Amino acid sequence: PQRASFQLGLINAIRREFVRCHICCVCMILEIHTLILPWATRLGHRTASRVLTQRAFLGLCSIIMSAKTETASTQASLRENFERDGIAVVKGFATKEECERMMDRMHTLIEKWDATQDVSAFSTDKDQEKTQGSSSYFLDSANRIHFFLETAATQEDGKTLKPEFSKFVAINKVGHGLHVEDEVFKEYATSDKVKSLSRTLGWTAPVLPQSMYIFKQPEIGGQVTSHQDSTFLFTEPRQTCLGLWLALQDATLENGCLWARKGSHKEPVRRHFARNPAYFDGDTSQPMMIFEPVDTSCKNVTWEGGFPEGRDVETAVRGVGFEPLPVKQGDVVLIHGAVDHLSLPNTSISSRHTFQLHMIEGPTEGIKWSEKNWLQYPKGTPFPPC
């Protein structure tokens, strides 16, 4: 009975340690023998040590093979779902502690930010070309940490805070180089689990051009109109953008969770948010950025950059195939660069913080970052590897 109890306890301990630390199998086998010998000697069963070691080893092999099979099956299922729908959710990808650490760090960054300096409002509506397309502050944020305001919290100039809003409430997002400039966000962005996830989905040598922290403020958190991420992160000769949308807080129907049209990633990318040659050739009366048509074959997608027509927006988006994706803190939503997605305004009293990474396949895989993209690092500065 003592031997049986000890063996069972040992196997359970091995299971816990293997799952928790992924200890090297060889080291673990040596550890088994080291653990068993004194116990067996104490119990007066010297010869039993060999038998116990063998049994423990066989149990360990079974555990390892089972874990590998289970992991491979889960990964295959995730990739299959992602390739079918263009969107998928990995539950519990980040711990509560990781999420809280990123939110605490962002609070510190906002505390240090001088909201009276050059800032800009952010919107994705019909005025996006004007709002982002006429702001050097936006263009200069490529590999820096810049702060963007909610349009509802700014004066008509889009830059000055309304007196009734504090900067903590007025902020819409922070971008686009958190993964470059800040150690807390960089640690997550370059973590082994992010790297492993990208490989599971089929990316071979991904790099990270962009990161964003989105607040979706209570009651004033604006809508994000229907769009494809590859419109803004355009690659050649094929589209390779992958978004990792990490929920730092619960995202619900009330506070503006994501909505996606599953399977729409099989449609072509419809437009490109590109640098305007006219402006950069010297005509500063023109906007810096414009939307260039790429493919107009999807005649039925009439809501690009907006919402489907209808008296009630939620009913309208459901009517054309969008589905809500409520998620819990720590869940990550995987977004194919061509999938059609959006979010509705936050009408609740709860915020909806997210940290979003965007990666593309790297140059070693024959992929080129479009020279027309708004986001351009300083010459000679490569995107950090995933």
Image (tube, rainbow, N blue to C red):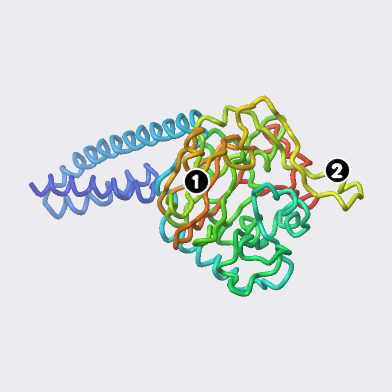
Q: Say the numbered circle drawn on residue 277.
A: 2
Residue at the top extreme, as displayed: 297
Q: Residue 308, image x and y in percent?
A: 57, 38
142 vs 76: above or below: below
Q: Residue 69, image x and y in percent?
A: 36, 32
Which residue lies at the image location 70% right of the left edge and 69% below the top edge? 160
Relative placement, left or right, of 238 versus 328 is right
Relative placement, left or right, of 386 versus 259 is right
Along the line of sight, the residue nearer the viewer: 106 or 38 = 106
Identify the element where label 1 is drawn.
strand
136 vs 51: above or below: below
Along the line of sight, the residue nearer the viewer: 273 or 305 = 305
Along the line of sight, the residue nearer the viewer: 71 or 337 = 337
| Crowd class of label 2 (few under 14; some 14 to 19; many from 20; radius 10 Å) | some
Residue at the right extreme, as displayed: 282
Circle nearer the N terminus (2, 1): 1
Q: Say the numbered circle drawn on residue 292.
A: none
Give the quarter of the image for residue 106: bottom right
Along the line of sight, the residue nearer the viewer: 199 or 41 = 199
Q: Amino acid at mark 1?
A: Leu
